[in-house]
Amino acid sequence: MHRVPGKRQAAINMDHYLTGAGQDREFSPGNVDDLFDALTESSTTRHQSLEQGFLDKIREDLSGAAVGTIRRYNSLNSDPSSPNWGEPWFGLSSEGGTNWFYAVGSFWVAFGGRARRDADGVEVYYRAYIYDRYNWDVERDSGMTIGKTTFIPNEIEWLIDQDVLTDQNMPEFRRWQPDYVTAVPDNPSTDVDEGGYRVNDALLGTMMEFGEAQPFDIVGSGRIRSVFLNYASEKEGSNEPLPSESKGR
């Protein structure tokens, strides 16, 4: 597997695509929390709102319950316009140019937890869950294989090996074609290398059809968090991760 500083997760995903035989790739709690730190501004706001809404619903639901009542909860998407209406999943996106953008991009998030009614409020232990499907889109238009495009910076240009792609011994679909890969020149007026390649997903997606790669599911859960929801006042406690000795739940 190629080691690419700053793009390690994308390299791991590509390796899994080629060698993982379609098995799930499971993110660690640390991976999931790092992913949440790399969201777009709007997704960061949405993530915080979804988490707070999940806790507010628990607080409301247990307000009339007897002390000692224990219940389990999952988030619920109640937006009729959402493709996940009636399910626990919501869409988020990572910030362009980050490690996680090239590895995941957009993905689904859900929340689940366990709550206990106390005399003064509710004690909640909960965590976030993520899901994404790793594949490369392949469509056909008038016999030509097409797909959406993805920008790949020069620092991971090992993915675009022109010698390999033009090798006459390689299958036709892996040969260099302008429709599949377009070079993007660097802007010399800036100090940042902005050059790279715009790659048609069909270049890698067709590998599935030839049995050289398998799409897979990305799953994972964040660290368990705890909070006490007080009925006498606003929320008290901390939503920071539990101490390390308490995370193994």
Image (cartoon, rainbow, N blue to C red):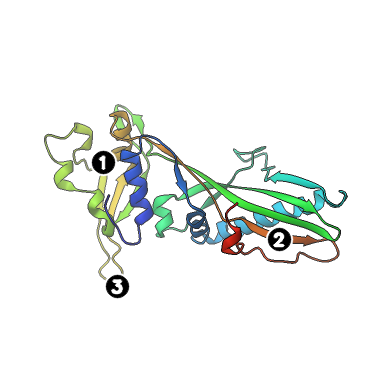
Specify whether 73 is left or right of 219. Answer: right
Task: Measure the C-alpha gap from mark 1 to mark 2.
Answer: 53 Å
Q: Nearer the viewer, residue 201 or 242?
A: 242
Dot label at residue 191: 3
Residue 247 in percent (x, y) is at 58, 57
Name which quarter of the figure residue 194 lies in: bottom left
Which kind of residue does numbered mark 3 sit on? Answer: Asp
| Closer mark to the observer between disc 2 and disc 3 | 2
Q: Nearer the viewer, residue 183 or 43?
A: 43
Residue 33 in percent (x, y) is at 52, 58
Which kind of residue does numbered mark 1 sit on? Answer: Asp
What residue lies at 67% left-to-right and 59% top-to-bottom?
A: 226
Q: Residues within 10 Å of mark 3 (few under 14, many from 20)?
A: few
Looking at marks 3 and 1 on the same chain, the residue that comes earlier in the sequence is marked by 1
Reading the image, the residue beneath label 2 is 227
| Closer mark to the observer between disc 3 and disc 1 | 3
Name which quarter of the figure residue 224 lies in: bottom right
Q: Secondary structure at mark 2?
A: strand
Reading the image, the residue beneath label 1 is 179
Task: Measure the C-alpha gap from mark 2 to mark 3.
Answer: 45 Å
